[in-house]
Amino acid sequence: MRRTILALAVTLATLAAVPRAAEERQAAAADGAGATGRYFASIRNHPSLLLAFLNEMPKGGDLHNHLSGAIYAESYLRWAADDNLCLATATMSIVIGTCDAAGGRPPASAVLQNSVLYSQAIDAMSMRNWDRSLNGHDHFFATFGKFGAASGKTGDMLAEVSARAAAEHVSYLELMLTPDGGMAALKGAAAGWDPDFARMREKLLAAGFGDVVTAATRTLDEAEARRSDLLKCATPQADPGCGVTLRYISQVARASTPQVVFAQMLAGFEIATHEPRLVALNLV
């Protein structure tokens, strides 16, 4: 009997402690939230402190990330130098072909050694030091054409955005890219337009559209392998970016011809059917 009464007393004491513990946790959380809110209010007009505060905040995922637009201009210039590309100084664009410093096409490697030209190129390829008297929308979209020639290093790009995401406490990325390397667009252009969607689809599938799926999977495999290599994943020196989950969005250039747009959309659906890493398509 005494043992029963003792057990009952212990049980009742435990049950009484549960709500007290819950209340204490809630109070602590409220105190923490209040302190956080007060600190945030105190630094709203201090950009450097605000940046540090926001950077350290835990975050979920970035669901609409244009991969090529998420890369720093400094990286594009460095990759351009590695690949012996040039900079057309008239437009501040990275270009392919023979470099000629006297003709306004210095090699990108020389640009890295010229602080003035290097700074001008970064400003042209990003929103840094943007002249607010000019149209920001136009300046932003013009940057894509300026660094496009150096944006083929998908694996290096994955490594950069993964490492930065981890540093900013982002754990999941959905990255927009063209996983088939433009193969679907070429097949669409070759097939021509047919306003009967079902017939257009069958025409494309019959023209070896399975190659598009194969190309996309190969592209993602190679890019992720390169990312793992650069971030030293599966080693003791692994970058935190290795833990960021990557998924992909197939982009569709909606301003193209109907047959090309249709082929790109079909590619997105066909790739997603066979490739679980592709989770969506988006008209850009």
Image (tube, rainbow, N blue to C red):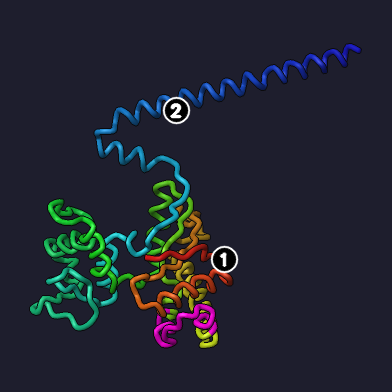
Mark 1 near mark 2, Cβ–Cβ under 8 Å?
Answer: no
Q: Which residue is mark 2?
A: 33
Query: Which of the 4 image quadrants contains residue 24?
Result: top right
The three-letter amino acid code for the residue at tag 2 is: Ala
Q: 10 Å neighbourhood of mark 2: few (<14), some, or many (≥20)?
A: few
Q: Residue 173's spot in the image, x, y percent?
A: 45, 56
Question: Can residue 124 be seen?
Answer: yes
Q: Residue 200's spot in the image, x, y percent?
A: 49, 82
Magenta-span inclusion, residue 10: no
The three-letter amino acid code for the residue at tag 1 is: Pro
Q: Which residue is mark 1?
A: 276
Q: Which residues are magenta?
A: 185-202
Residue pushed farthest left?
A: 102
Q: Residue 247's spot in the image, x, y percent?
A: 49, 61
Q: 10 Å neighbourhood of mark 1: few (<14), some, or many (≥20)?
A: few
Q: Main secondary structure of the magenta part?
A: helix
Tell me what residue is drawn at x 55 percent, y 24 percent: 26
Query: Which of the 4 image quadrants contains residue 257?
Result: bottom left
Placement of the C terminus among the 4 image quadrants: bottom left
